[in-house]
Image: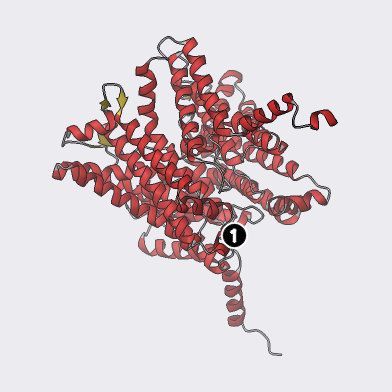
């Protein structure tokens, strides 16, 4: 077809531009998000209100933080599923230190120390001892949850310090509209985005995840890069754990169960590859928001919670299969 | 040439056992049994041994299927949710039809049906099975509450039904008989048949299998459906054990099963694994569970110890094998 092969023809250029746009998965994700908002706005009058739209951001901020960390680990060629238990564990030093000292910053410090310790163990075992990270973090998922049960005797540890600042980080609203957890999560996600896409270290994470061998040959310390990926992932999960504890007003021993799967599903929906080295943080964040607004919208039209789970599952399968279909055609 | 003395022979045997794939597992199992027998007087009794086997059977039945799946380099995270849903189906169908056989058949068919969908999503829609089966888990967790809001109680009072979980055949608990048959059949197929070799090949080198004229997709399809059907079988036993179909049952079951299979030496990368390893690993985990109760330790350790054992086992395995990957 000599005609269509001519790149100067307008319809050809149009199709090329279109293909370029459709090939950019973030735009496709954004369009899906907008579609979800449009559909639910027409179905429920309460959906498209500033109050609802921002409330969802507040609720989604916890999974958003966890998912961003999981995305960093996945891009670095590793996986971290211990985050679901970590969220519950870090709330313990947070609440206990706060109750004992009345200081939020000391509590946060305690939470961060524990979170970083867990991340360091994950990273050391996976990156330096080279044990498969799925197994390491699966083991840690059990270990940490058991530790939390032992520590708490399976009872929620209530916050008895009643600090306004602690209440505010999970429940407050800036300017009366924007949930503070959403702002915290947003700022942190932007920071991670900057690290991943604008710094040399971010490029090294992509290199280590894409092909550890090549990265090693170029002279990168792959082990150190992967170790730091685990630190990033557990730090973000720790912040999520702090926000969750504030929202619950307690360190709840059962909290965070299943978050690891929700986060992985959202991140993969956002185009991050399980094989490492591919995907980006913006896509991962859009994946989280799509699932959050979908679930909220279904709630708004009074679909039972059960349907929300079913539909979420179907959406994930549909999105991922579409993506792999597109890749197979390329 | 001098004859081997008994001493030499047992030495050689010990060395062979230790160097075999199961060496580590056998040593751990032995240490556990010896240690617990010394520490708790009521550990090494026939009744406790039977109890341990009884508790192992549910996990083992599903773990056999999961071993097949992991060897083909696929995974099924939905087994826990499938177990809960299928147990409700079993009880419901028996209530409706007054037939245990129909109920069991329905449960197994339901489980296999879930496996079929998992296979379709993985093999036709080309969704990574980790993600596809997480999605299936969500769908089943939601779906089971749409199906029944609360536990499906036993309204049929058929006498034989509770016996599935609590009865004995020749002094052996019925679930143990089921688990033994499943494990033996799985072992025979994997280790002794050409089909079994194809299972390994499909996980290790898909392209080679295709080139030799076989379909790796068909092998994986079989592994998914079989795992689902085995979940259905486990659901029949679970429903009988609880005397109800319990929509909340099975939480975390997938992690226990996968932990056992990995501890048993099956590789996540596919192409490597044995049923015997899985059997030993399930026994180790259940003996630890049992020991914690016997020693009157805090039962929360029942979650911690398997996590530790899993990481330790993989570390030892890695050291033995040398830094092959990473």
Of all chains, the one bearing label 1 is: A
On the question of residue B142 being in view, the answer is yes
Q: Residue furthest bottom?
A: B1
Q: Position of residue A314 (x, y in %)?
A: 57, 27
Quarter location, residue A57: top left
Q: Secondary structure at mark 1?
A: helix
Query: Residue placed at 70% from the left, 43% from the top?
Result: B220
At horizontal 35% and vertical 39% (from top left) the residue drawn is A240
From this viewpoint, is residue A255 visible?
no
The residue that appears at 55% across and 22% down in the rendered structure is: B92
> Residue tagged by mark 1?
A214
Say how many tags the image has: 1
Q: Quadrant of the N terminus of chain B?
A: bottom right
Name the one closer to the observer, B69 or A130: A130
Query: If the image is split into quadrants, where does the C terminus of chain B sit?
Result: bottom right
In the rendered structure, the answer to whether residue B139 lies left or right of residue B65 reads left
At which x and y percent is residue B31?
Answer: 45, 65
**Image-based side of A77 in relation to B43, left or right:** right
Direction from residue B165 to residue B271 in the image, left or right: right
- Closest to the observer, A276 or A299: A276
Applied colour scheme: secondary structure
Residue B32 pos. (x, y %): 44, 62
Question: Which of A17/B140 is in front?
Answer: A17
**Furthest residue toward right:** A1
Q: Mark 1 Cα within 10 Å, few/some/many (few <14, many 20+)?
A: few
Question: Where residue B187 sits in the image (x, y, percent)?
Answer: 67, 53
Is A197 rendered above or below residue B267?
above
């Amino acid at each position: 077809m000599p005609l269509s092969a001519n790149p100067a023809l307008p319809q050809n250029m149009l199709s090329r531009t279109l293909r370029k746009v459709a090939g950019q998965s973030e735009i496709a994700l954004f369009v899906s998000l907008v579609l979800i908002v449009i559909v639910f706005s027409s179905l429920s009058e309460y959906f498209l209100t500033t109050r609802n739209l921002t409330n969802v951001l507040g609720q989604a901020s916890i999974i958003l933080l966890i998912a961003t960390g999981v995305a960093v680990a996945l891009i670095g060629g590793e996986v971290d599923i211990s985050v679901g238990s970590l969220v519950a564990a870090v709330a313990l030093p947070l609440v206990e230190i706060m109750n004992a000292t009345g200081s939020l910053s000391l509590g946060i410090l305690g939470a961060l120390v524990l979170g970083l310790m867990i991340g360091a163990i994950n990273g050391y075992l996976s990156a330096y001892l080279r044990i498969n990270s799925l197994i390491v973090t699966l083991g840690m998922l059990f270990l940490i949850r058991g530790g939390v049960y032992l520590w708490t005797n399976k009872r929620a540890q209530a916050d008895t310090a009643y600090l306004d600042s602690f209440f505010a980080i999970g429940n407050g609203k800036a300017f009366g509209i924007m949930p503070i957890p959403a702002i915290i999560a947003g700022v942190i996600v932007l920071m991670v985005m900057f690290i991943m896409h604008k710094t040399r270290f971010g490029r090294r994470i992509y290199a280590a995840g894409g092909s550890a061998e090549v990265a090693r040959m170029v002279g990168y310390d792959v082990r150190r890069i992967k170790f730091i990926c685990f630190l990033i992932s557990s730090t973000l999960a720790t912040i999520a754990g702090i926000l969750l504890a504030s929202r619950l007003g307690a360190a709840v021993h059962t909290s965070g169960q299943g978050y690891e799967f929700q986060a992985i599903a959202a991140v993969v929906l956002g185009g991050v590859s399980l094989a490492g080295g591919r995907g980006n943080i913006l896509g991962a964040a859009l994946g989280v928001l799509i699932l959050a607004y979908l679930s909220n919208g279904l709630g708004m039209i009074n679909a039972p919670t059960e349907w929300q789970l079913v539909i979420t599952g179907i959406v994930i399968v549909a999105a991922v299969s579409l993506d792999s279909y597109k890749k197979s055609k390329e | 040439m001098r004859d081997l003395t008994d001493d030499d022979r047992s030495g050689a045997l010990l060395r062979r056992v230790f160097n075999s794939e199961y060496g580590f597992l056998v040593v751990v199992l032995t240490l556990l049994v010896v240690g617990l027998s010394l520490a708790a007087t009521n550990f090494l009794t026939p009744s406790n041994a039977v109890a341990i086997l009884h508790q192992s059977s549910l996990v083992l039945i599903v773990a056999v299927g999961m071993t097949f799946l992991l060897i083909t380099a696929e995974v099924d995270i939905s087994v826990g949710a499938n177990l809960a849903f299928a147990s409700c189906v079993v009880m419901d169908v028996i209530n409706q039809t007054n037939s245990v056989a129909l109920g069991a058949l329905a449960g197994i068919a339901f489980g296999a049906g879930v496996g079929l969908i998992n296979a379709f999503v993985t093999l036709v829609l080309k969704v990574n099975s980790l993600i596809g089966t997480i999605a299936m888990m969500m769908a089943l967790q939601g779906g089971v509450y749409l199906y029944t809001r609360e536990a499906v109680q036993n309204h049929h009072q058929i006498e034989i039904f509770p016996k599935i979980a609590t009865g004995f055949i020749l002094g052996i608990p019925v679930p143990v008989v089921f688990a033994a048959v499943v494990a033996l059949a799985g072992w025979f197929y994997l280790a002794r048949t050409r089909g079994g070799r194809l299972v390994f090949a499909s996980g290790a080198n898909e392209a080679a299998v295709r080139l030799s004229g076989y379909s790796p997709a068909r092998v994986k399809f079989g592994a998914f459906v079989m795992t689902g059907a085995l979940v259905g079988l486990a659901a029949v036993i679970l429903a009988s054990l609880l005397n109800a179909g319990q929509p909340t049952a099975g939480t975390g079951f997938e992690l226990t099963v996968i932990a056992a299979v990995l501890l048993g030496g099956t590789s996540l990368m596919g192409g490597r694994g044995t049923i015997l390893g899985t059997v030993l690993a399930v026994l180790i985990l259940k003996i630890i569970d049992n020991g914690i109760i016997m020693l009157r330790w805090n039962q929360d350790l029942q979650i911690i110890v398997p996590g530790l054992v899993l990481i330790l086992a993989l570390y030892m395995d890695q050291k033995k094998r040398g830094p092959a990957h990473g």
